[in-house]
Image (spheres, coloured by chain):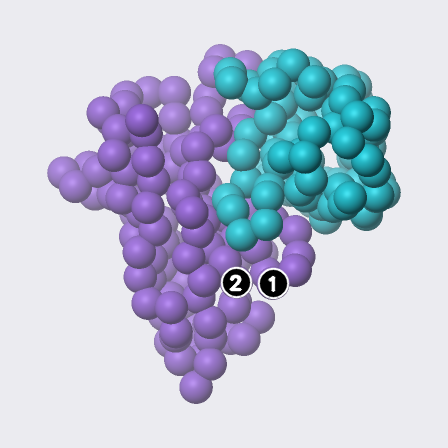
């Protein structure tokens, strides 16, 4: 059973950097056909795609966050990470990591999700 | 960005009811539309991809339809475990965007 698990601090000071890691327990981490993404959900709100990365290291980011976001992959550990700089209270949210599927069609979707981790930005 | 608008924002229904949720895109997205179910305190779960394809393991009472700008998610006979929030998501054009969610309540 494929599992994704987020980890990282639950509290971040304003203007600091939010750092999260997603550990992936699946052999297909290195295979094609998948991307590895981050999505967040503000309290009581809808979902917001942050960005995703391929095993090759290619990345795609939401333009609204691009200047502050970095997603990286550590293939030796089957992990990928999110860094969000200069955080404010507006970055307080539930952060999910997820596996994105590319099945040869133009459509892209997330078929597996971590449980999510709440990050609060506060002093 | 492509805006995704779901309606209604919430609805009340009973077990056994047929429920339909609509998702409208601000521009044509062909069939690049996915549906997720999110139970309280849980991560989203993929139900439907490419507008009408049922994800493996998802009950047959769930179905999706539509193309272009207008899409629907239908639950043919609502079960107790279906009370949740449903989200649509487009992947036609980056940034991928989600609807604001539809909460299905008892």
In the image, is A42 to the left or to the right of A20? right
Chain name for mark 1: A
Query: Which residue matches tag 1?
Result: A43
Q: Secondary structure at mark 2?
A: strand
Label 1 vs 2, first from the N-terminus? 1
Query: Which residue matches tag 2?
Result: A93
**Outermost residue to the left:** A76
- Position of the C terminus of chain B, as image quadrant, is top right
Query: From mark 1 to mark 2, how far is it between C-alphas?
Result: 6 Å
Residue A60 visible in the picture: yes
Specify few, some or many for label 2: CA neighbours under 10 Å numbering under 14, 14-19, or 20 or more: many
Cβ atoms under marks 1 and 2 closer than 8 Å: yes
In the image, is B13 to the left or to the right of A84? right
Q: Which chain is cyan?
A: B
Residue B67 visible in the picture: no
Instruction: State the image coordinates of residue A26 (x, y, percent, origin top left).
Output: 26, 29
Instruction: State the image coordinates of residue B25 (x, y, percent, origin top left).
Output: 78, 35
Q: Secondary structure at mark 1?
A: loop
Instruction: State the image coordinates of residue B17 (x, y, percent, origin top left).
Output: 83, 27
Q: Which chain is purple?
A: A
């Amino acid at each position: 059973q494929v599992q994704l698990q987020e980890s990282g601090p639950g509290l971040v000071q304003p203007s600091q950097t939010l750092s999260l890691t997603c550990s992936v327990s699946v052999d297909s981490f290195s295979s094609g056909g998948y991307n590895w993404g981050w999505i967040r959900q503000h309290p009581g709100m809808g979902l917001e795609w942050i960005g995703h990365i391929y095993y090759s290291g290619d990345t795609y980011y939401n333009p609204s966050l691009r200047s502050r976001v970095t997603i990286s992959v550590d293939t030796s550990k089957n992990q990928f990470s999110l860094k969000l700089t200069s955080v404010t209270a507006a970055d307080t949210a539930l952060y999910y990591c997820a596996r994105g599927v590319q099945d040869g069609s133009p459509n892209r979707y997330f078929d597996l999700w971590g449980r999510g981790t709440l990050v609060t930005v506060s002093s | 960005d492509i805006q995704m608008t779901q309606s209604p924002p919430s609805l009340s229904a009973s077990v056994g009811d047929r429920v339909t949720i609509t998702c409208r895109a601000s521009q044509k997205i062909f069939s690049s539309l996915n549906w997720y179910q999110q139970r309280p305190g849980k991560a989203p779960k993929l139900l439907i991809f490419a507008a009408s394809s049922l994800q493996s393991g998802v009950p047959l009472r769930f179905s999706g339809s539509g193309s272009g700008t207008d899409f629907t998610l239908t639950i043919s006979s609502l079960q107790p475990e279906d009370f949740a929030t449903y989200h649509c998501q487009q992947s036609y054009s980056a940034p991928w965007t989600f609807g604001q969610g539809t909460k299905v309540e008892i």
